[in-house]
Image: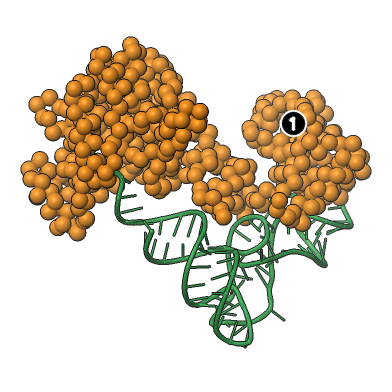
Chain colours: A orange, B green
Amino acid sequence: MRSLTEIEQNRLVKLERLRERGESPFPHRAERSHSIAMATKHFSERSSDKDKSGENSLEITLCGRMRSVRTMGKLAFAHIEDVSGRIQLLIRADAIGKDRLKQFEADFDLGDFVQVTGKLMETRTGEVTLDVSNFRMLAKSVSPLPAAKEVDEEGDRRVYSAFDNVEARYRERYADLAVNPHVREIFRVRSRAITALRYFLDKRDFLEVETPVLQPIYGGAAARPFSTHHNQLHQDLFLRISFELYLKRLLVGGFERVYEIGRDFRNEGVSLTHNPEFTQLEFYWAYADYEDVMMLTEQMVAFVAEEVCDGTVVTYQGHKLEFQPPWRRVSLREVLNEYSDIDYLNCSDDQLVSHFTLRGLNVPSNATRGKLIEMLFSKYVEPNLIQPTFVYDYPRDISPLAKTKEGDSDTVERFEVFVGGLELCNAFTELNDPIDQEQRFLDMGQDHNKESGEAHPVDLDYLKAMSYGMPPNGGFGMGIDRLVMLLTDQSSIREVILFPHLRSKE
RNA sequence: GGCCCACUAGCUCAAUCGGCAGAGCAGUUGACUCUUAAUCAAUUGGUUCCAGGUUCGAGUCCUGGGUGGGUCACCA
């Protein structure tokens, strides 16, 4: 147990004083007649002069957290805050008695949750204020919240001593949320965005499903997994790296449109755009191909932007992003040529490698042709794709679950969406030929074998499912965290995850 | 994993060439019946991230470590 600070010791003394007076510092129940926003709304809608003095008002009861206190001898002002807003309290000795005011001043602190009863009125400066006739503690704050003072000065909001140490904010996200309203707003936007996605897909007859997080074989993406173990079953398990293989099994089972929103886990590097666990949306759509999916994608993201940002134009890191469809569509070959002057279709493997050496880039020993193309793309193109852009038609060897283009066995029907320099979506016309799929798995296993001596697991059960017959379909994946980054103008994924992964201290 | 930067009171930050570790806010005590960064007076509060080293003397310099931020690399 850490030692208490002086402030904490003081507050424990106050807590005991409350108890001695028979007031619980942590009562079981609270009462409240209105949220703060509802109370002030009603008041300002129908306040006559008599209302403004408080004479006409009915008593109401509000709950909230104390955010400021100003004591002035025989009266005190304070602000309390609930989820809906803030309101000022006026506590007068001639309303509640001198001793009671003294008790308030002595034992109630910033950060305490309180319940207050009184009538609404306006102060001389015109601020809607609760003229308090009764108050009680709802929950004593023993440790002081990080001090942060805010003030409106002629429309400018200024914050003093803001709690903005990034590490401390992440480690104590509860305190961050408690004192930083703009942080709370990010997570409201996140929630509304997910609600909007569900609404959009549900309206189009997509069925939301849940598939296993613990999987005996991982697959559906190029990533290293976290592994764990089931004790009773003596079975090694992996945390999923994607939902793909399970969702497509459901198409075999007769569902035509399914989606899942949930957590993926990837045991890889952490960065501004990567967290070890992240939220993914995937959907699979029978009888559709990747062009249908492109159309749905731009409609869906535009819909979400309108729902949560009141329009399809979103400011991100100084750029005005326009989500209104149609978005730019460009093939991988074209866009790579545009930004790097490399046309890989007219390059032999050796020529491709020479582009790396010419530019002073390392060529990984195990890289396939497709991998090299992808690396060039990430380096020269990706950071430049600011407006929503579909990049389509990818090399076959880096897309083992996608169907090849008719008449072009080196290329698959796949697209990715890039916005603000971020990779946002990945989708393809899904491979549904079990014989082709088995060969792709085997090819991958061999490549992997060469390099690390570990075989990539082949999901035989998935192949079996596909062998029963899988309808042609378009599949789609989108990183929800990155979408929220775009919608809230955050450059770090950790700002849009409530409790981002941090190394433990000590 | 490499490199760069940061870490000082509850919070935000100062501390000159290596010379008594400070301010604002918060806290505590007092004054004050319309304040809102209330004001006024007084006042408390420190393992300067950790462990070593150099020095008469280290927040400051050196070595190692920790955590975070940034960046590059890695990521079938």
Q: Position of residue A337 (x, y in %)?
A: 15, 44
In this rendering, would A145 be left or right of A416?
Answer: right
Q: Is residue A439 above or below residue A471?
A: below
Residue B20: name its quadrant: bottom right
Q: Residue at x 33, y 25 (%)?
A: A245
Number of on-image labels: 1
Q: Nearer the viewer, residue A403 or A67?
A: A403
> Label 1 lies in what chain?
A
Q: Foreground: A185 or A469?
A: A469
A287 displayed left or right of A320: left
Identify the residue position indicated by label 1 in the image.
A62
Question: Residue A215: which quarter of the image?
Answer: top left
**Which quadrant is home to the C terminus of chain A?**
bottom right
Residue A488 at x, y = what percent? 46, 39
Q: Residue at x 35, y 17 (%)?
A: A250
Is residue A301 among what the camera can see?
A: no
- In the orientation shown, which residue stands out farthest toward the top? A254
Please give the name of the residue rendered at 87% of the width and 40% of the height, measured from the top-left corner: A19
Residue at image position (34%, 13%) is A253
Using the rendered image of the protein, determine whether residue A350 is visible from the camera's viewpoint: yes
Rendering coords of residue A128 (x, y %) = 72, 36
Question: Horizontal placement of A272 versus B31: left or right?
Answer: left
x%, y% of residue A219? Answer: 33, 31
- Tell me: A480 left or right of A362: right
Instruction: Answer above or below: position of A382 versus A413.
Output: below
Q: Residues within 10 Å of mark 1 (few under 14, many from 20)?
A: many
